Image (cartoon, helix red, strand yellow):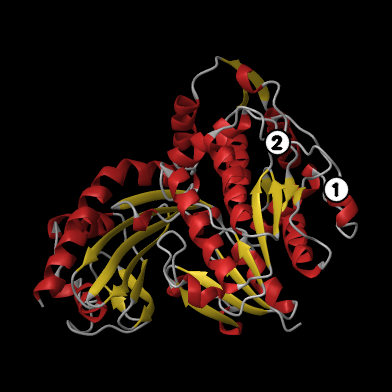
Amino acid sequence: MSKTVLLTGPTGYVGARLAPRLIEKGYKLKCLVRNPAEIETRSWSKSAEIIKGDVYCGLNLKNALEGTDIAYYLVHSMADTRDFEKYEEVSAFNFASAAAEAGVKKIIYLGGLAKKDEELSRHLKSRIKTGEILRSHFLNVIELRAGIIVGSGSVSFEMIRYLSERLPFVPHFRYLKKSKCQPIAIRDVLSYLLLSAEKENLSDKIIEIGGPDCLKYYEMLDIYAKVRGLKRFHLPCPSPSPKLCGTMISIFTPIPYNISVSLLESLKNDSVKSNDDALKIFPEVKPLDYETAVKYALQRISEDKVESSWTANYAPSYHKPCSFIDAQGIILQDYNAQVNAENEKVYRVFSGIGGENGYYFANWVWKLKAFQDKLIGGIGMRNGRRSLSEIHQGETLDFWRVERIIPSRMMLLRAEMKLPGKGWLQFQANKISGNKTLLRITAYFEPKGVFGYLYWYLLYPIHTFIFKGLIKEIKKRSENL
């Protein structure tokens, strides 16, 4: 094929899986992304043209859409901000205007499955509004409307998974008793997206896609528990507000509050197909039933073959000073700050931590941790670091091992102290523009058993104190170099 395709949202859950499949189909692929570094390490990135841009700001849209035959609109702002509706509308308007001006022949948009005439949640209302904005500027828009997407790493599946695994019962909320949905496997969503580009006879259509099962939310939890061999009883619960439910879910699952509230509000609405047009237009696709989709997702997780995760599209680092994520068995605590210095200077500062240089902030806490590690038979501070000014991959640094180095950009340390699990500490210096750099410090922890979780959460306040102080000190030293 000689057609040129522009993919927006290539770092998102669906986009990251669609990109390599488009390349396999022979399309000339262009990817529009805010931070190109986020996809440069993917195996398929060298086969695509990576363009730095932003649909909300309108940055580089004209260049990205020039010469494009088909454009996939997979941008979703719900994960970025609570006030996501205005971002969705502005982004859709900017993209549609630029696409029409560039003469793009077809836009393929993945929206939400719902009936417009119902009293919809903010999330679903925004999804439908986005489709309307795209169509108002562009004649040929193929809108695929999907409900809950089931796959390893999807936010909906992760919510089902964690609730089923961590709660000894299935919560039975009365206000969700009547609503139903048609979950669809991620592989079927990808098939529909790919075929929408291939079929020439599609023009300005809204196509509802879903699996063969029409289920209530607690039935999805029941089926998951059955697949996992978990015995769960139903517990009738009062009807709290989605905000209270969202708070509870954010405590028991890795799903952030703003996302969990949006998903819960959407569960009030039926997410069921009103026709079988998808089966007629795409007879090649035989959608998987929900139970089979769950089994495939769990198999992917057990084989460590998760292609993409919702966490990649959850980008709190651009909007908040810190984030906390627990997904796929890994706890992630992330802090960031904008530094008015070149990334080389920022890298020079953080790559110099440890040894006689110390840790720049609350050094006594790090020493106390090393002493505690010694008491239980660990390595303690060991021999510090080989050099005070340079560091190489594979070297030791106090109670860390330097697992990976990308000069001027990143340093990843693996903990070699005694822990109820595995730990890493990562420093990144990502150039924004000119002499501005986004500094990120990310702590990763893979807990082992219940004690591993208790260990991490008990130390969470101390970690917060240390990392906030550390990132401020690195910022100050970098700007003073």
* The N terminus sits in image quarter: bottom right
Callout 2, which amino acid?
A: Ser
Q: Quadrant of residue 7?
A: bottom right
Can you see residue 40?
no
Q: Quick check: 214 above or below 292?
A: above
Dot 2 or dot 1, earlier in sequence:
2
Can you see residue 466?
yes
State the count of labels.
2
Is 431 displayed left or right of 175 in the figure? left
Q: Are marks 2 and 1 in contact (CB under 8 Å)?
A: no
- Which residue is found at the position 64% from the left and 54% from the top? 135
Foreground of the two, 168 or 99? 99
Q: Which residue is mark 2?
A: 271
Q: Quick check: 159 above or below 280?
A: above
Spatial CA distance of label 2 from label 1 is: 16 Å
Q: Which residue is mark 1?
A: 277
- Which residue is found at the position 80% from the left and 37% from the top? 274
Foreground of the two, 335 or 362? 335
